[in-house]
Amino acid sequence: MDLKNKFEYFEQLNKEAEIGGGHERIEKQHAAGKKTARERIEELLDPGTFNEVDKFVLHRATDFGIDKKKFRGDGVVTGYGKIHDRLIYVFAQDFTVFGGTMSRSNADKIVKIQKMAIENGAPLIGLNDSGGARIQEGVQSLAGYADIFYNNVLSSGVIPQISTILGPCAGGAVYSPALTDFIFMVNETSHMFVTGPDVIKTVTHENVTKEDLGGAVTHSSKSGVAHFTGDSEEQTIMMVRELLSFIPSNNMEDPPVQTTTDPIDRKLEALHDVVPADPNKPYDMKDIIFKIIDDEHFLEVQPNYAGNMIIGFARFGGKSVGIVANQPSVLAGVLDINSSAKAARFVRFCDAFNIPLVTLVDVPGFLPGTQQEFGGIIKHGAKLLYAFAEATVPKITLITRKAYGGAYDVMSSKHIGGDINYAYPTAEIAVMGPEGAINILNRNITNEEEKAKAVEEYREAFANPYRAASLGYIDEIIYPEDTRIKIINALDMTRNKRKSNLPRKHGNIPL
């Protein structure tokens, strides 16, 4: 073969690899409203930065006649490129080749890219669109999945791992995304479940659609499996790029800093009346969040799940922070099973990746009831307590109104390692609300007028931040209009914080 023929042969193999399962299957993918693996990578990465790895890999299986059917790349496109000019590793399952199913050689490609991401300290993004294990390969396919899971665990807290579900993801395939830091789904296109509708009907006789069982709406609002959802692939992929702008490339780096024209000393007169004088009147905590952060840019995580807790990323003075906040307009901002677990996972992510935590508190306590107690609110609430106590990143806390009982302790109080703890003059820090307290302390009072007077006396004595401030539990009581500058000053003061926990293999968080 002469030189010309060698280059022509190379070009032919390139075209074979890039066409995946062929034009017909690509058209079918497009007809279903889905892009191909290569189109998705092109959309995700900065233009012209993708470098493909293992483009010519073929499967090695021989059973059931599969050896007569081979495609270059074998159903997954892997490589590296850049997002916002930062190194990123990526794999994209190709549904046009064997339905994107997992083969041994397919898994080897993903494992290789996982190892490269760990060794070079860069985020790994998986674009999932697969029918699951390749049945013709049996246990080899299952072994491939387990190798990927193992690397997911080793990578956890070392590099950010992001899963984007852009089609089906079923059976064992769901556990790799579940082990990663964030899961993105597309409305009406993405589906995740361990057992599908047909199996459920056979075993439990329940009728359920694929969408109701494992669609984006279900996982973003009911199960809490998904963190972000988009209306289209393009929107979802843009959200992945936005998330990466807030987080560092690995656990040894600080988050990226962005320049901002938003003045750090901006006064917030509008905040003066956000917290109502009536302690039982709800308000929207986002009215505070959007006013105090840079440019009103807040990337909320799990916005449709456990709405009594708000979590997400923002910036103060151009620097990334994680925000954890009670939401008084939903269930009065109580802590329950779902909100505790939601916030705990987010706190641990921020702590692993050097992202300071800003906590906004308005919490009347834990949600009472048999459903919560039987569901294990004790251990789930303890997850959030554990996460805040374990975190060594800068922790800035602001109590806007209620901070009652054990929930006061849990929400990044001074006692579990809060670095700077602020309170508005409207803050109420007490064991419980005035009405409940008087019902216990003065249970003999039957006269309504006397009871009202006792409640008012308790409110004046305890429903304020001054007793806590006199004990040093609150560092400073601030005017609402000074919130932004005070938080930025505290973040600046704690920028070089150095704190490590006692030596141990790992703690035993109450799972």
Image (spheres, rainbow, N blue to C red):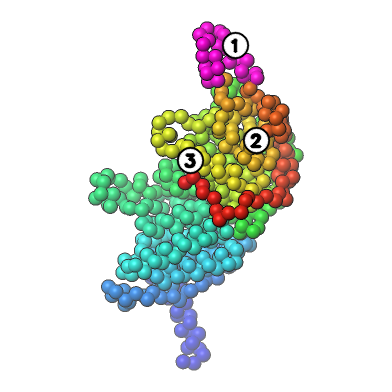
Q: Is residue 470 above or below residue 349?
A: above
Q: Is residue 340 above or below residue 429?
A: below
State which tag comes first along the sequence, 3 or 1.
3
The circle on residue 254 is: none
Disc 2 target residue: 398
Say whether residue 2 is left or right of residue 412. left
Residue 301 is situated, as x and y percent measured from the top left of the image, at 53, 45
Q: Is residue 364 above or below residue 301?
A: above
The circle on residue 380 is: 3
Residue segment shown in magenta: 436-461
| Residue drawn at 70 percent across, 44 percent down | 491
Instruction: Give the amino acid at mark 2.
Output: Leu
* Secondary structure that dominates the magenta span: helix
- From the viewer's side, name the closer residue of 402 and 304: 402
| Residue situated furthest bottom in the rendering | 2
Residue 398 is situated, as x and y percent measured from the top left of the image, at 65, 35
Instruction: Give the amino acid at mark 1.
Output: Lys
Separation of residues labelled 3 and 2 (CA atoms): 23 Å
Separation of residues labelled 3 and 1 (CA atoms): 38 Å
Disc 1 target residue: 453
| Residue drawn at 53 percent across, 60 percent down | 155
Instruction: Give the amino acid at mark 3.
Output: His
